[in-house]
Image: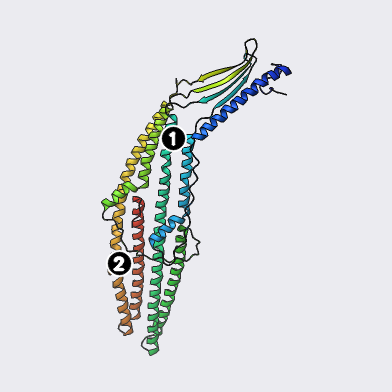
Amino acid sequence: MCDLSTLVSPTRFPMTLSRCRGVCRPAVAAVAIAAMLAVCALGVAAHGAEPQVPARPAPAAQAPPAGALSYQAALDLATARNLGLAAAMRQRAIREAAVRVARQYPNPEFSFEASRDVPHEVVSLGFPIEIGGKRARRIEVAQEELSLADFDVRSEQRTLRRNLRQAFYGLLGADERVRNAEAVLAIARRVRDTANARFSEGAAPRVEAMEGDLGVARAQADLDLAQSDRVSVQADLNAVLNQPAEVALAVAGDMTQPPALASIDEAMKIAETSNVDLLRGQREIAIEQRRTSQLRAERVPTPVFSIGGVFDAPGEFNSGLSGALTLSIPLFTRNQGEIAQSTATVSQLQATHEAGRRTVENQVFGAWARLQAQRKQVEVYRDQIVPTATTIEGLAEEGYKLGRNPLLTVLEAQRNLREVRREYLQALAEFQTAIADLEEIIGAPIK
């Protein structure tokens, strides 16, 4: 039994059983024809569609190498294991899917009409045909946007390099602080032993022996603090390497090694070709220009070609073919507003890119100047200040043993040596920070 109550009200269009059968037979046939045509159209579209592109898997995890890690080994390990970088790499699969979306063809349109007018039933299947290069322009925009995935990865790599350098050389600095604290503790113990020996001989008052014990206790507290700080900094490096916080790490390197950049001109050239923000700005300009071209192509109307059948025209025919062409007339809207907006966006992006280029130039100049200043400071501490403070402490200690200097002179020399070494480590940390700043600006690692 056929029921067309959802299409036509029975009070307005009474239908007998024979009439309903007469209507349903051609309608069912038309629906079958439409289904066959739709299947064929889907088959053609599927045949010409972009093949399925599997998502790129995350980089395989690598086990940390045995022995002490060098900076390059740590960078390779972080690149293979870092979760943030792996997430950025998956962004490419999303943009590749957007290209597949742009390649899709519009779906056909099926319609069925039943009325009291003759012919009583009309079945049609319409096929939108994109002309004027719309599909090609849409694909070009998606392909340009696909390149942004590479900049997402490079941005994450830039952040990873900075975090790794600060954590790696921070751990080197923590090791150096532990060694300095151990050296200060050894000196404090020697001074205490000397003070106790002089007190036992009656050559020094008891207060000097007590001051020696106090110096050892203070040096031991500094050593405990330095060891605790090392555990914290090691956890920071483990986070960058995607390892459990409790995993023990040993690192090896030279915090005083200057970067292998010959001049500021070389740094400028690297920034022009590697700075992620500048390159992304250039790509965004190209994408918007492609989008402007797409908007111009979309001004051409999309014709819809329809083929179908008409049925049940009493006194004339039982069934027949029909064809139609539907075309919107671009009388009022021709994307003129959208094109003007896109053109203005291109102009704004170009101005922003030029401003960014000037900003990067000044940033490179400033970072290079800071790097050179920090390098000179490190060299002065390494070659002059630290050796001189070490010599002064040794002379003060030797003079105290011989009874030529009071204990206060030795304690003052120890305090001065401790402060000088602390300042030297701070200068080394700021030197590595300056290198990290320059790396981040130019967008490339500095060996």
Residue 282 in the figure: left or right of residue 314: left
Between 58 and 123, the one nearer to me in the picture: 123
The quadrant in which residue 214 appears is bottom left
Q: Quadrant of the N terminus?
A: top right
> Residue drawn 45% across and 21% down?
330
Mark 2 surroundings within 10 Å by alpha-carbon count, few (fewer than 14), some (14 through 19), many (20 or more): many
Disc 1 is placed on an element classified as helix
> Residue drawn 46% across and 48% down?
89
Q: Quadrant of the C terminus?
A: bottom left
The quadrant in which residue 390 appears is bottom left
Q: Does residue 413 lie above or below 85 as drawn?
A: below
Between 181 and 135, the one nearer to me in the picture: 135
Q: Which numbered marker is on residue 409?
A: none
Q: What residue sits right under mark 2 in the picture?
A: 381
Q: Which numbered marker is on residue 139?
A: 1
Q: Give the mark, 1 or 2, whose residue is nearer the N terminus.
A: 1
What residue type is disc 2 on? Answer: Tyr
Q: CA distance from mark 1 to mark 2?
A: 60 Å
Camera-nearest label, 1 or 2? 1
Residue 336 in the image: state x and y as whole percent. Answer: 41, 26
What residue type is disc 1 on? Answer: Ile
Residue 119 in the image: state x and y as whole percent. Answer: 62, 14
Q: Does residue 263 lie above or below 129 as drawn?
A: below
Tell how many labels. 2
Mark 1 surroundings within 10 Å by alpha-carbon count, few (fewer than 14), some (14 through 19), many (20 or more): many
Between 236 and 425, the one nearer to me in the picture: 236
Residue 419 in the image: state x and y as whole percent. Answer: 35, 69
